[in-house]
């Protein structure tokens, strides 16, 4: 089965970057591009910069938000130019490619790239199960978005062709929960913490972010998410809470 590795670009401002990304993808034998709320697309400039990869642009999926782009994915890897203080599982491009290749045989995998101006928001990073950072000059770490896509797609091609060592980044359970299931769980968790009086508004955002990291790191499968939600419902004093 052809692996479904999709490149997701979030709110790209410059259509030229979308074209350059399509070209980078096609060079590396990738074709699935998803555009989240692009500022200017379709656009002649994107076609010009795609330079023969117009098929990738024509087939690109345009969606209104990141949730729509990744809802069916179990592995979602966000590309970040900055190293964050909250410890997301952080991969090198080579490790990210190995993970995507292994997980992508059965399920869609998303590699998510941020805006030229401000990257990905914390809320968008919350959707990601892993982060990838391209090693750079620490004092000048932000690549042009299409160039970042090029580096990651190159690693994906190497690992697909078996030319690069496959980094061991832990087991991906076969039925790892989807992003939609994880979001259902996180919503339930926030409500339950509130119901049992564990959080107050002031500190809950930070706490929830840490809990998200914890549960993403655990890569629960769908059944385990249901068990956790059952426990939450019990703590809330409900017999069951299904959404
Ligand atoms: N000014 C933004 C960076 C935007 S660069 C910031 O400070 O966050 C646009 C996008 O390219 C980023 O969101 C990221 O997805 C990707 N990118 C750029 N440099 C990268 C790097 N060194 N490693 C991983 N991704 C990078």
Image (spheres, grey):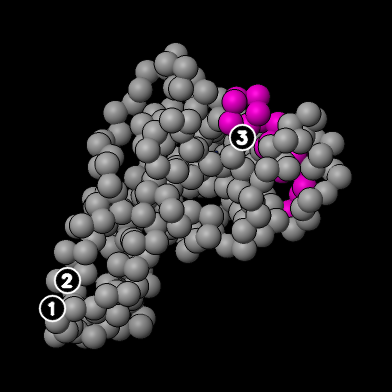
> Quick check: 153 above or below 143?
above
Disc 2 is placed on an element classified as: helix
Q: Position of residue 45 (x, y in %)?
A: 84, 43
Q: Nearer the viewer, mark 3 or mark 1?
A: 3
Q: Residues within 10 Å of mark 2 (few under 14, many from 20)?
A: some
Residue in the foreground of this view, choosing between 84 and 187: 187
* Residue 97 image label: none
Disc 1 is placed on an element classified as: helix
Q: Is residue 155 left or right of residue 243?
A: right
Disc 3 is placed on an element classified as: loop
The residue at which mark 3 appears reads as: 31
* Residue 230 image label: 2
Decide if ligand 1 comes within 8 Å of the CB at mark 3.
no
In which quarter of the view is residue 200 placed?
bottom left
Q: Position of residue 130 (x, y in %)?
A: 39, 46
Mark 3 and mark 1 in contact? Answer it, CB < 8 Å.
Answer: no
Residue displayed at 35% across by 22% down? 166
Q: How many marks?
A: 3
Mark 2 or mark 3: whose residue is earlier in sequence: 3
Distance from the alpha carbon under mark 2 to that under mark 3: 40 Å
Mark 1 and mark 2 in contact? Answer it, CB < 8 Å.
Answer: yes
Q: Is residue 160 left or right of residue 99?
A: right
| Quadrant the N terminus occupies | top left
Q: Position of residue 44 (x, y in %)?
A: 86, 45
**Magenta part of the protein: which range?**
13-31
Magenta stretch, main secondary structure, is: helix
* Residue 234 image label: 1
Q: Position of residue 70 (x, y in %)?
A: 48, 54
Residue in the foreground of this view, choosing between 170 and 102: 102
Residue displayed at 61% across by 48% down? 34
Residue at the front extreme?
Answer: 1
């Amino acid at each position: 089965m052809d692996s479904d590795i999709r490149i997701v670009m979030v709110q790209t401002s410059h259509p030229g970057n979308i074209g350059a990304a399509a070209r980078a993808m096609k060079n590396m034998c990738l074709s699935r591009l998803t555009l989240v709320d692009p500022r200017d697309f379709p656009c002649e400039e994107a076609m010009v910069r795609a330079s023969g990869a117009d098929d990738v642009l024509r087939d690109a999926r345009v969606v209104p938000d990141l949730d729509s782009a990744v809802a069916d994915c179990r592995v979602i890897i966000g590309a970040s130019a900055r190293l964050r203080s909250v410890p997301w599982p952080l991969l090198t491009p080579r490790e990210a490619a190995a993970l995507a290749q292994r997980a992508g045989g059965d399920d869609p995998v998303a590699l998510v790239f941020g805006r030229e101006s401000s990257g990905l928001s914390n809320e968008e990073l919350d959707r990601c199960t892993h982060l990838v950072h391209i090693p750079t000059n620490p004092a000048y770490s932000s690549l042009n978005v299409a160039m970042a896509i090029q580096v990651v797609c190159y690693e994906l091609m190497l690992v697909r062709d078996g030319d690069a060592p496959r980094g061991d980044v832990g087991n991906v359970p076969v039925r790892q929960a989807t992003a939609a299931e994880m979001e259902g769980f996180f919503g339930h968790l926030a409500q339950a913490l509130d119901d049992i009086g564990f959080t107050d508004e002031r500190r809950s955002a930070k706490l929830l972010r840490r809990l998200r990291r914890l549960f993403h790191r655990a890569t629960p499968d769908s059944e385990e998410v249901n068990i956790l939600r059952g426990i939450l419902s019990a703590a809330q004093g409900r017999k069951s809470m299904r959404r």
